[in-house]
Image (cartoon, helix red, strand yellow):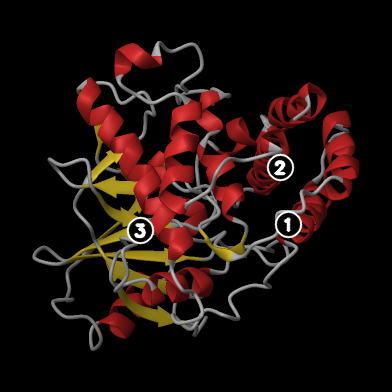
Amino acid sequence: MCTEAKLTPVREAHRFDEAALAEYLKPQLDGFGEPFDILQFEGGQSNPTFLLDCGAHKYVLRKKPPGKLLPSAHQVDREYRVMKALEHTDVPVPRMVLLCEDETVIGTTFFVMEYVEGRLFSNVTLPGVSPRERRAIYFEMIRVLAALHSVDYEALGLSDFGKPGNYFARQIGRWSRQYVSAKTDQIDSMESLMNYLPQNVPSDDITCLVHGDYRLENMLFHPTEPRVLALLDWELSTLGHPLGDLAYSCGPYHYNMPGNPSLVGIDLAKTGIPAESEFVEEYCRRTGRKGIPNWNFYMAFAFFRLASICQGVYKRGLMGTASSTQALERGRLTRTISDLAWSFVKNGS
């Protein structure tokens, strides 16, 4: 259903010096003063995120997690940079306020952004929403995705935000290394994927700005309209291939995460939600594509990457540093998700 983001008291593993934060922010934020309340957002498996409530003004703080971190992960400075660059484009993002790279303030790099009041849809079936609005919401997702993939990243000063070309080869290498670094058990399908994927990358090699975690739950919608006000959680954003984002966004058509219903087995025509084929066709229409050969490769890659992410979440959960209480539960899904990824390979293109 549509809810506001869930807030909890700051979890013990993520506590920091609130007085030091207040002293740092007071001269820099309009309307910031004491007393102020800090609550932690439950969502987000990677970078802890907090609401700073000063009464008349609200801000959101996002930081690196504590503890030893995997290589190239949790780069909140990159999140800040890409959202700052997109502020005046057709891609809806929160307004960035400041980036603090001085780790002596609260122990890690962090950034502060505006708090956006909107609807968060945590259930992809959109209960309580009319069929007409459900359809509009899904097509709005595609509109924003097409807008993102169409921005001139060089004009935005993001030409060095990643390496152009060879996106899938590099990503497969990266997530293979991340998986091996966080490995706890033998999973045959992951071993098969790490062997198969780099040898079967499609020749369609284009570059655009990608989000990396493009899904309904990372969007805030207007309170009454099927319109995205803010696309959130840019930690995995880079220069890459647009079909990585598109395939990942189609995940709910194939897999049901525990506690978060999917579109598997749903009568989509009755609900108003477009079928996967229609969802993909609308993206192709908006971006001028005639079709997508090798679709199963992109889906296999999307679930392979998700499996690697889940393994990292699981390992951090074992170490007590993951930013969600669901980390251990979701991390154990690695085997199931990697088996699904491998099934796309076995089913062919």
Question: Which dot marks residue 50?
Answer: 3
The quarter of the picture where residue 315 lies is top right
The residue singled out by tag 2 in the image is 301
- Check the picture and name the quadrant holding the C terminus: top right
Q: Earlier in the sequence, mark 1 or mark 2?
A: 1
| Residue 305, x across and y down, in percent | 69, 45
Give the farthest residue toward the front: 290
Vertical comparison of 304 with 33: above or below: above
The quarter of the picture where residue 93 lies is bottom left
Q: In this orientation, which residue lies closer to the viewer: 266 or 123? A: 266
| Residue 2, x across and y down, in percent | 25, 32
- Check the picture and name the quadrant holding the N terminus: top left
Q: Secondary structure at mark 2?
A: helix
How crowded pointer 3 is (Cα within 10 Å; few <14, some 14-19, many 20+) is rated as many
| Residue 54, x across and y down, in percent | 16, 66
How crowded pointer 2 is (Cα within 10 Å; few <14, some 14-19, many 20+) is rated as many
Q: Secondary structure at mark 1?
A: helix
Q: Mark 1 is on which residue type?
A: Gln
Q: Earlier in the sequence, mark 3 or mark 2?
A: 3
Q: Mark 2 is on which residue type?
A: Phe
- Regarding residue 129, the answer to whether it shows in the image is no
The residue singled out by tag 1 in the image is 171
Give the farthest residue toward the bottom: 27
| Residue 159, x across and y down, in percent | 57, 80
Measured Cα–Cα span from mark 3 to mark 2: 32 Å
State if disc 2 and disc 1 touch (CB < 8 Å): yes
Q: Secondary structure at mark 3?
A: strand
The structure residue drawn at horizontal position 25% and vertical position 35%, both measured from the top left corner, is 3
Q: Earlier in the sequence, mark 3 or mark 1?
A: 3
The structure residue drawn at horizontal position 27% and vertical position 21%, both measured from the top left corner, is 127
Q: Mark 3 is on which residue type?
A: Phe
